Image (spheres, rainbow, N blue to C red):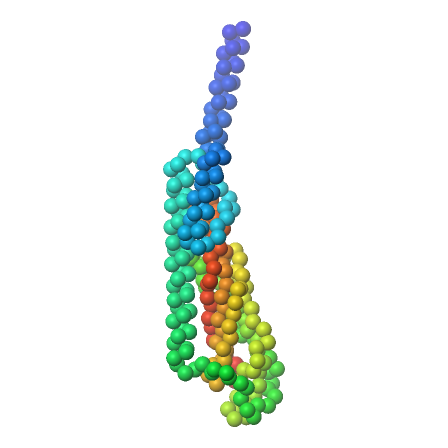
């Protein structure tokens, strides 16, 4: 009988050892709720949207603090990259405005005749996002009507047929174009295209993943008409 008791005690002790790690690392509902609130506070602070894709939960304050610190560091880097993106876009636009290349109220050049190109499409690729140098690449395109000018002896852009942008490569998860603007410059030889959009990226911290959407990224490029 004593032998059976010893065996039973040994089995119970072994079960307790196996279960202990699960109990140690399982988050309590209160701790999990507090952590989610802390993540929401960071999203509000930095003006982004955050959703937890995968989470190795822990109830220890130290682990949660390390996760939040890592997440905030990446959010700071992301906002810095976004501000620099907007600064460069605005600087380039202001240079264009003061250069005299912008054709306000531009129309198709007189004495235009049929061109061998009915329409023409130009593609452009720009990198954005907080991850450097392996940033997310956005593919943009513009298709425009083409006319031939006897006066300039070359093709010029006419009206815009269509524009668009989409996620092409890199760590980004999603790209949503929110606005665009096309201006005719260089006497009709060039389109100046600007695109605004929201980028969703995954920030990986240890074994955890956070899906972060930042708004207001800008893309700008010049699309040249085939001569």
In the image, what residue occupies the spot 43% across and 44% down? Answer: 38
Q: How many marks?
A: 0
In the image, what residue occupies the spot 52% across and 81% down? Answer: 225
In the image, what residue occupies the spot 41% across and 83% down? Answer: 100
For residue 131, side relative to residue 11 (left or right):
left
**Residue farthest to the top?**
1
For residue 113, side relative to residue 76 (left or right):
right
For the N terminus, give its image quadrant. Answer: top right
- Is residue 93 shown above or below 150? above
In the image, what residue occupies the spot 54% across and 82% down? Answer: 157
Instruction: In this rendered view, identify the residue nearer to me: 92 or 17.
Output: 92
Residue 83 appears in view: yes
Image x and y of residue 51, in percent: 50, 48
Image x and y of residue 146, in percent: 57, 83
Image x and y of residue 133, in percent: 41, 59
**Quarter occupied by residue 112:** bottom right
- Is residue 74 shown above or below 181? above
Residue 170 appears in view: no
**Quarter occupied by residue 162:** bottom right
Image x and y of residue 118, in percent: 61, 82
């Amino acid at each position: 009988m004593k032998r059976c008791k010893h065996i039973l005690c040994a089995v119970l002790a072994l079960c307790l050892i196996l279960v202990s790690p699960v109990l140690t690392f399982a988050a309590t509902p209160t701790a999990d709720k507090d952590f989610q609130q802390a993540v929401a506070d960071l999203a509000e602070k930095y003006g982004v949207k955050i959703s937890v894709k995968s989470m190795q939960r822990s109830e220890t304050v130290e682990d949660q603090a390390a996760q939040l610190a890592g997440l905030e560091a990446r959010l700071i880097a992301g906002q810095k990259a976004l501000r620099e993106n907007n600064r460069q876009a605005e600087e380039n636009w202001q240079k264009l405005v003061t250069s005299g290349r912008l054709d306000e109220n531009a129309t198709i050049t007189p004495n235009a005749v049929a061109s061998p190109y009915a329409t023409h499409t130009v593609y452009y690729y720009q990198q954005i996002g907080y991850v450097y140098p392996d940033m997310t690449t956005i593919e943009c395109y513009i298709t425009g009507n083409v006319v031939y000018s006897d006066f300039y002896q070359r093709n010029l852009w006419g009206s815009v047929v269509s524009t668009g942008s989409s996620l092409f490569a890199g760590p980004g998860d999603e790209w949503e174009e929110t606005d665009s603007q096309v201006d005719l410059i260089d006497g009709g030889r060039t389109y100046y295209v600007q695109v605004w959009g929201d980028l969703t990226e995954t920030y990986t911290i240890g074994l955890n993943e956070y899906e972060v959407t930042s708004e207001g990224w800008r893309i700008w490029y010049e699309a040249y008409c085939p001569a």
